[in-house]
Image (cartoon, rainbow, N blue to C red):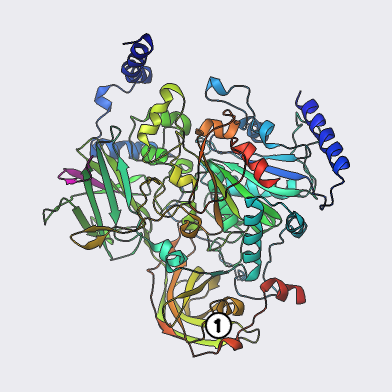
Amino acid sequence: MSRKKIALVLVLVLAPVLYFSLLGSNDASDTFMTADRAVVAVNAQTSLMPPATISLPASGKQVPGLIDTNSQVVLAESTNTIERIRAIQEKTEMHRAMLKDYDQFKRYPENNQRIHQAEQDPLIKGYAIDERTTVSEDKTASLTVWSDKKYYLRGDLVTVQAYITNDKGTRIPSNYVAQLIFDESQSIQQLEFQDKDGDSIYELSFIADQFDEKDLLAGIYKVLIVSDISELIDSVAFVLADPEATFTGNYRDSITSEGNLLVEAEVNVTSKDRFYFQASLYTELGDPVGGTQLSQNLDEGKNWVPLDFFGLMIHDSKVAGPYVLKNISLARVTMPMQRAPLINPNYFTEPYELSRFSQKKFDDVVALK
Amino acid sequence: MMNNKKSLLALGAISFGLLIGSGQTMAADNCYIMVHGHGVQGDIRSEGRKNWRDAEFSQYNGSDFMDDLLGASDNYGIVGYNSTDEGGYPYWRDETAGEITRQIISIKAGNGDGLTHDEAGTQCSSSDDFWVVSHSQGGAEMMWIAGNAVSGAPYYNTAFGASSAVTVDYASAMSGVNGILSVGGAITGTEGADRVCNGSWTDAIIATFMGRDCNDSVKWLQTNDSYAAKSYIGSNLGAPFYVLGGYKGFPGLAGITSGLLTGEDDGFLNLASQMSCSGSGKRSIESDLNSYKSFLGINYGSPTYRCNNANKGTPRTYNLASIYTDHDAERNAGISSPSSTSIEDGITCGSGGNMAKRINDCIN
C-alpha cells in the first residue's frame, strides 16, 4: 500500500472519531433518539411562540383580484430593458427565457394563468400529498411517511402511513413510536402505528377534533415518527383548519362586456374575514384551459364570489364551450392559511362560441385605457 | 484594488464600444439588490454586505461574491434584515419580508443602500436595470414577496407582526424587477431545520449553521409543505424567479452534514429544495420517477415529477443552473470554476463559472 493510500485510510478512519470527539456533548448515549426524548427536546426548544394562527385585521377595503383594468394594480415591468433585449442580435438563453416569460406574463391579467397540462394545475399541486423520504446516514435504510391530506377540517379522520425500506428497496418490518405535537411546542398525544395486513406499511389514524375532552386548536400539527431502525426520524405536518366558509354548490356563468368568462360560486360564510379562492377551468373533453385566483373580504352570510377567466386565455385553448369548472378551493387567510378541502364541482358553463371571447392581450387592454 | 480593477474594466469596455461602433441599443447599468440568508444580526446592512464575503471555511477566505458578479458598469445595493435565531422571525414577518421590501423600494428609487462601497461609483440609480440576488433564507423571503405581489394573491401586500397583519407594498418592490436570482435558496426549506425541530440533536454541525433551537425562523424553514413558502403564495409571481442550486458537500470534516441530508445537497440545503421542483423539498432529484409508486398494481403515495420547468413546484420559476458548490462558497464565490449539471428543460447560459460569474454571463 502506498503512503498516499495509507494516509487516506487513516483520514477515513479518524475523521468520524475526531468529529464526534470535537462535538463534546454528543456522546454515544445521545445518538439514539427515543420518541419521549424527541418530544422533550421539541418541547424544550421553543421560547418565542406567536399565536398558532394570526388573523388579518378586519377591513372593508377590497383586495384586488378581479380583471378590472381600471383598478387592478399592474406591475410595471422594465419595458426599456425588455426592448433592449429584443434588440440584441445574439441573445443568451437567459435573454430568450426572459422574453418568453415577459410575453406570457403580459398576455393575461396577473391573477390568470394558462394551464397547459393537468399536472401543472396549481390546485392539484397545492393539495398534492406531501410524501417524504429520509435516508439513514449509512444509506442502508429509508423511512417514507405521508398523511392522506395536508389540510383537515375539524372532525376529519387523519391517516398517517409509514414504511421502512432496506438498501435493496424492499419494505421491512419496524417498530415505530409517534407523537402528535401542536405548533412545535405542545405534546398532545402519543399515537400507535399498526400493520394490520402485514404489508409492512404501517398506519395510524385519529379524529381531528378533541383530545382529553379538549378541542384541538386550528393550526399546524406534526406527527413525529421515530423508527427503531437506523435511528430514522421524520415527521408529517398538516393544518387543522376552521375555514369558516363553504361552497353551497350553486354556480352561474356569463360573458362580461369585456369578453371574459365570469363564473360565480356561491359561498356561505360563518365569520367575516378575508378569503382566498382558486379555480381552474377545463374544456368539455377534460383538457385544461387556465386558472384564476382571488383574495377578497367577505361578510357573514351567503356571497357570490366572481371568478374571472380572461377572454384571450380561453381563446388560446382553441376549444369552444361548454367549459368545465373542474377544481375550486377556498381558504381563510390567516397565518397559517386555513384551507378547506379541494372541491371538484364539474360545473358546465353555457356552450359559448369561441368568437364571443376577447382576443386582446391584457397589456393592450391596459394601454387602451 | 477593486476600484482600480473596475476602472480598468470600464475603460476597456468603453474603448471596445468606440472601436466597434456598436449599433445595438445602449444598455442601462445593472443594479443587483442583494438579499442575504440566515443568521445576519447587528448592523444589518453592513453585516449584510459582509455576508457576501464571509467564509466559514478558510479555503474561501478573501473571496467576495461581488468580485465575480459585477461587470464594468454594474452597481449593487445591500439589503439587511434580522435573520437570526435570536430574532426568530419567519419569512412572512414584517421584520423580514417587510424590511426587505422597504429597502428594495428605497434602492430602486436611487436612494442608495446607506453603505460606503469599497468599489467606487457602484450605488444604484433609479434608471438602472434591477435584479434581486438572494441566498439561502433570502430565497424563501423573495418567493413570499414575489408570490404576494400580484393581484388576487392570498397575502397580497401583507406581512405579519407579532399578533396582527400590516400592509407592505410588495407590488411596488417587484415592479420593474427583471428577475430574482436565487442562489442556494431555501425555497422549500432545509432538512437541517427538520432535524433541529424534530429534536434530533446529534446533528450538531447543522445546528452550528442554523442554531440549536426550533425558533420561529427555523421552524418555518422546515421542508414540510405546511411551512414552505410555496404554500403561502398565489398562482403567479410579481417577477420571474431564476434558481441556481448547489450540490457539493462542505469541505473537510464538515462534509459529514451531507450524510444528514437526503438526496443531493450543498451541505446545508437539499438540492430539490433549491431547485423549485415539485414534490418534497428533501427528495432525491436523481431518482425522479415521474410516476406513482405501485404495489400489487395499486398506486399509492404521491407522484414525483422530474425537476424541470414544466413540472416546477412554483409558478414563473426557472431552473438556471445546478452547480458543484457548497452553501458557503455559493455566497462568497469561494470556488472559482466549479463543474455543473444540466437540468432537464433548464436554461443553459454562462461559461462554467461559479454562481456569481454565471449570473453575470447570463444577463449580459
Chain bearing tag 1 is A
**Callout 1 secondary element:** strand
From the top left corner, tell me how far across and down residue B295 is, in percent. 20, 58
Q: Point out the image quarter for the C terminus of chain B.
A: top right
From the top left corner, tell me how far across and down residue A6 is, in percent. 33, 11
Residue B45 quadrant: top right
* Residue A54 appearing in the image: no
Three-letter code for the amino acid on which mark 1 is drawn: Leu
Residue B39 quadrant: top right
A225 over A365 or under it: above or below: above
- B176 relative position to A347: left or right: right
Residue B168 quadrant: bottom right
What residue is rendered at 74% in x and 57% in y?
A78
B198 over A303 or under it: above or below: above
- Mark 1 highlights which residue? A262
- A35 relative position to B97: left or right: left
Q: Sort mark 1 into few (<14), some (14-19) or many (20+) by Cα contacts within 10 Å.
A: many
* Residue A330 appearing in the image: yes
Magenta span of residues: A166-180
Q: Point out the image quarter for the N terminus of chain B.
A: top right
From the top left corner, tell me how far across and down residue A191 is, in percent. 21, 50
- A74 relative position to A316: left or right: right
Q: Please tell me which residue lies in front, B106 or B319.
A: B319
Q: Please tell me which residue lies in front, A202 or A299.
A: A202
A176 over A219 or under it: above or below: above
Q: Is residue B79 magenta?
A: no
